[in-house]
Each structure stands twice: as structure tokens, then as C-alpha cells.
Amino acid sequence: MTTVASSPAQPPGPPTPAAPPVVEQPRPRPAQTGVWIAIAAISMTFAALTSAMVVRGSAAADWRHFRLPPILYLNTALLLASSAVLEAGRRRVAAHLVWVTLGLGLVFVVGQVVAWRQLAAQGLFLATSPSSAFFYVFTALHGLHVLGGLGGLGYVLRRFDAAGPAPVPALGAAALYWHFMDVLWLCVLVLLVLRV
Amino acid sequence: MTHATVAGAHRHAPPQGFLRKHVFSLDHKVIGKQYLDLALVAVCTGMILSWLMRFHLAWPETPIPGLAKLSPNGAAGGVITPEYYLSLMTMHGTIMVFFVLTTAPFAGFGNYFLPIQVGAEDMAFPRINMMSFWVTLVAFLVLISAFVVGDGPPLSGWTAYAPLSAVGKDAGPGQGVGQTLWAVSITLFCVAQLLGALNFVTTTLDLRTKGMSLARMPYSTWAWFITSVIGLIAFAVLMPACILLILDRVAGTSFFIPAGLVISDRLQPHAGGSPLLWQHLFWFFGHPEVYIAILPGFGIISHILPVFARKPLLGPRVMIACLVAIAFLSYTVWGHHMFLSGMNPFSATLFSVPTLVITIPATIVTLLWIGTIYGARLRFTTPALFCLGFVSVFVSGGISGFFLAQPSIDTYLHGTYFVVGHFHFVMGVAAMFGIFAATYFWAPKMFGRMMNETLGKWHFWLTFIGVYCVFMPMHYLGLAGNVRRYSAFTDDYLKPLIPLHRFITVAALFTGAAQLIFLFNLIRSRFRGPQAPDNPWEATSLEWSTTSPPPFDNFGGRPPVVERGPNEYGIGSGARGVDYGMQAAAARVSAR
């Protein structure tokens, strides 16, 4: 752009007439950027917990290994499916597919609660062993973030209902976050399979 | 008024009604002022606590009138018990570090000025911004409720070292409900600051106006941007650490509590936890937190100093590079807080080296400030004085850091007043001077009124001399072996030091009283001060291109177009005495 050498102490002139029509340029997408930054912070949180798990695991010989509830694998499949549906919904800007994702996400959360109950039925509670403690902390924190994602999807659906253009940027951001929930869950699952 | 069409999802209509305008406001300017108000309440609370501690240290037997009412157990008859002293210390540190040094320079001024300085109408996510403030407020209320709930406030220090912080009420008064409130408060605070930092980073990256390239951003914007990146990582680590601490306290887990721990003659029902784990997690946050407190000050000083030196900042790109280097290195030095923790001595060396390395960019930054004022015809206004004061106290406090970075010297000094003097100078007082400089500098913009210069200068000189009287002798106390965290000095080798403690106490009371001048000036000028012009200091950045105070959408619907960087001072002789170039030509906008 050209640099215009104008006096800083411009006298107050009459307001300039309306600016010429602005050519639409590719605008930055704050929603998308915001989700990327949130992804960075959330990754850091889970990295901190992972390192805490490693340190705590080697701090004492009280780590009790147990078999993960099998329903976790079903939940994993549900979450991955929900992501695929949402991706289709994002590409076609289709509200009904977002609804399906919302439903699958809710079923995932319920499935995680079922996994907790199965574990509790085996006598494995939060304070039973550091392994069960970390299991509950990881799954609960991930579940809370999934609930946040569901809130985001609900927001997108509300925007679909409102008058005006389809909420494409919001849908893109929500989808990005939702896919990250998949990746995060896979990381957590691998970690739990390896260590718990 | 016609509004230029601005794409982007962040626009929101001007608020209607008192609640939406002043309380649950989405406007970043209102939220910024709310943060500053909160910080003002917090700093008064924290300072009163320090007065109580200082008074007790100087005259441990003398009752403090009225204190027995506040805490019948902690100060029966007005005399502070050793436990209550630790509670006051814990609350002083927590309030000051989190609710003053983080909220004022970063969340407060950053919220108000970052969007304006990049030419945006608001933050990227106004709703998240509002939520961030309200969660911070709740965190503060939860924290200070510890004064009246249960056995009083916790006593494990602002660092809340486990296992003391983790075992519960056996560990002393305040370690029951009080410590839990502390952990909940800090968890909430982390969430709030993560939301805030998310907004800062997104706004800086995506909402810059036309022509505002990264290289043209003011240094204060750069500093807030870098600080928020640090905060995103630091608070994201402290939050899970606090969650684990809460679980240890209320759910019976053993993350931080080792086996066989007997406290108050009671075997603790925990096993296998690692107290060192808490220290690592805490200081991985804690050291970057020091830079969260001080980097906005760096930015503010770099922003303000050239205005009054009427010279461009020396080495602007070096300055930014140094800030980035400090941010990066801040994550490699946390272990220097743990030289005495019993960790591997080899790791002490490992943490000592980056600690010494981080002094290099910090020193370069200082030299750039001094180089900027070298040969300048400085305008000695109050903000300029506080900038110079900042450099002075930062150097004074920073130099003692060189000593503490050596594990062998730190072994002797770590538990003494040397460290108290060091961190109060380098992060406490320096950051406060940054806050004062920012307040005197930006108050005309925020309130549309000038602050009184005479009172400002009195405030500066009394504070400047006062803080040296308070914190400089602490270095000598530390070298003399005066341990910190003691509520009274009864050992023979400490008794000769008590007169110096009395001097410090008197100086602290006077310095605190001098802040009343500031408060009076702030409140009086808010209503009775002379009207501020749009650009009273002849500065260049975008906030000075709009009205004082700025209209609701900052630029009256006409986003500024940036033509040059923020560093255009001392250019040409200027036909009308104008020696600077605004980043964007001043656009007249109608207020509100």
C-alpha cells in the first residue's frame, strides 16, 4: 500500500463522504482462529495431566492395572461416526446432519457415564488407585470438553434457525473443535490402554 | 451516522439500559475498567494485609485494634498468632499475584487498549470476554470468603505447596475449608484467564485494521499478545494441577500426598503421592506467571517512554525479539524455584543455565530503554517519571536475580528476606510502576479527564523513595540470614535485626499512605479534572486518533487506516511544531 504523508495534526474537517464500495476480500475467520487457540490450550492441559500421570505412576508401587470397560470402544466408534457425519454436514451446510452429530455426541457422553458405572461396579472408584483416579480425571475432563462442543453445536443450530445466511463460519469452527475432540479422545484412549 | 460495512461476526449493537451498559457489558472498554476496578479493590485488600504483617513483625506483642473482631481465633486480643500470620501472607501473595498483577496490567489495560490499538471495534468474542471478567470476580469472592468461612484463610503460601495444602484441616487452621476455597478460586481464575487470553490472541491475529501489519503494532499490543500466549500455556497447566489438588482434598485421592504422613499426630489416609509433582506443575505455571505480570509492563514502558523522550524506541525489532525470547525461555527455568526441594542436583544446574540466559534478553530490553532516553529532551510528566522508576526498580530487583540463579548461592539465600526483596522489586513494584505509568498515561483517554500533575509527581517521588526504603534493606536482612515466613524474630541472631524491621514497617506504612494521594487524584480527576483533548501527549498510536473517551465502537464507524508504525517520533522540525507521525490520520468521530 502507498504511504500517505499526512499531517498528524489535521484540522477537524467535515466528515468525508461515504467510502466507495469495498471489494470483498477473504476475511480472517476469528471463530476458526479461536478454536485453534483453544486446541492449543486444551492440548497443554492434557499434556500436563499426562506428565502428572507418568510422574505419579513412578512415584510409588501402588499403581493398580485394570481392564478398561469394553464399552469405551463402542463410544470411540460413536464419536468417530459423529465426526464423519458433522464433516458431511459442514460440507453440505445441512442442519439435520448437525442434529445427528448432536445426538451421537450425547450418546457418547452417556456411554462414558456407563463406563464409569461399570468400573464402579468392579469396586474401582476415584480414590481406589492412582490408575483409576487418572482414568476418571481424564475421561471427566474430556467429557466436559465434549459437552462444551455440544454447546457449540447447539449454538450453530440456533443460528440455523435464525433469519439470515447459514452460519458457515460458526459451523466450520464447531466442526474443527469436534474433530479435535476425536483426536484428543484417541490420544487419551491410547494412553489409558497403555498405562492403566 | 453511517457505519462503514465491516465484515466479521463480532459486531454487536450498542447496549440499552443500565445493566447492559455498565454491569453485564460486552464492551471491551467497560470490561477493561471492571478489571481495573477489581484490581483496585484487590490491591487495597492486599496492601492492608501487608500492613498487618509488617506491623506484627516490628511490634509482635502490640495488639492491633479491631483485628480481634475480624478473626477471633487468629488474632485473639488483636495479637496475630503465627498461624494467622501465615494466613495473611498466603492471602497477600495470592491476591497480589493473581488479582492485581495479572488482572490490572494484562486483563485490565489489555482489554481496554488492545482492540483500540489494533483498530478493532471490540474483542473477537465479546461474550467470552464478559464471561472471563465475571468468572474472575467470582474467583476473587471465593478467595476472600476464606476470611469469614471456616477456620479462616489457608496458610500454605501462594504456592500452596503439597502435602501441606493437600491434607486438609489436620494441617492447621485454614487448611480445611479455607484451602479448598483457595484451590477452587484459582481453578476458576485459570478458566477466566484462559478465556481472556483466547480473546487477546484471536483479536490480535484476526481483527487488525487495514494497514496494521504485525510490524506496525504498538509495543504494548505486542506485549499483551505475547503475554496471552504465555498465559494460554501457563494457566492450562495450573488448572489441572488445582483440580488434582482439590481431588486430593475432597475425594481421597493421593496425587500429592506420600504414604505414612503423620500430621498433628494423625496418620493421613493417603499413600504414594508425590509432593514434588505439585511443585513441578505449580512452577511450570509459576515462573511464566512472573512474566505474565511483568511483560505487559515492558510493553507499557516501551510504548510510553518514546512519547515523552520524543525519540523513537531504540531497536524496536530487537525489543520484540527479546520479548519473544523471554516468553520462550520462561518455560525452561521453573526448576530454579526448586533448588531446595530435594530434586536431583544435576537438574538444578540444568535449570540454572537458562535462568542465566534469560537475563540476556532482559538486560537488552533495559539497555534499549536507557538508549532511548539517552540524549533525549525528556518531558518529565508523571507517566514518564513512573517509566523511569520502572527501569530503576527493575534493574535493582533484577540484579539480585543473577545471584539467586546460582544453586549454590540460592541454597543460602532462598529461605531469607533476600528473595522477598528480589521478587517484590522485580515483579511486584516494577509491575506496579507499570500500572501507575499506564494509569497516568491513559486516564485522559479512558475518562476524558486529565489527572493532576502536581499530585502525580508527589505520588511518584514518595512511592519511589518509599519502595526503596521498604525493599532494599530486605536484601541486607537476607544476607544476614533473616529467614522469611517467620511471624516474629525471637532467636538471638535475629534480635539485632529488629530495628531494621521497624524501619521497614514505618516505611511501608508511609508508602502505603502515599497511595492515598493516587486514589484521591484518580477519583477527583475522574469528575473534576480538566477535559482531556484527543491526544494530550502527542502520541502516535491509534487510541489517540479517536475521541477521549472513545465512542462505543471505538472509531465512530470509520475504522482507521494505518499508514505507518508507532515509532515515528522526532521526525523533522515540523512546520507547526509537530515532531511525530500518527499511525492513522486523526479522524474526528462524534462521541457516543
Image (cartoon, coloured by chain):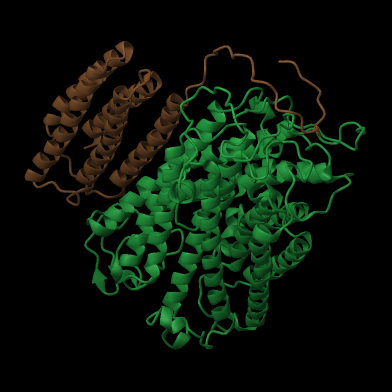
Residue B491: x and y in percent read 54, 82
Q: Above or below — where is A89 with respect to B277?
A: above
Q: Quadrant of the C terminus of chain B?
A: top right
Q: Which residue occupies 26% across, 20% down?
A: A83
Q: Which residue occupies 44% across, 50% down?
A: B19
Q: Is residue A8 left or right of residue B184?
A: right
Q: Which chain is brown?
A: A
In the rendered image, is residue B72 in sight?
yes
Q: Which chain is green?
A: B
Residue A50: x and y in percent read 33, 38
Q: Residue B205 appears in which quarter of the rendering?
A: top right
Q: Is residue B211 left or right of residue A62?
A: right
Which of these two is toward me, B264 or B377? B377
Residue A141: x and y in percent read 28, 40
In the rendered image, is residue B280 in sight?
no
Q: Above or below — where is B409 with respect to A150?
A: below
Q: Residue A99 appears in which quarter of the rendering?
A: top left
Q: Residue B324 appears in which quarter of the rendering?
A: top right
Q: Which residue occupies 58% across, 32% down?
A: B120
Q: Quadrant of the N terminus of chain B?
A: top right
Q: Residue furthest left?
A: A121
Residue A109: x and y in percent read 19, 34
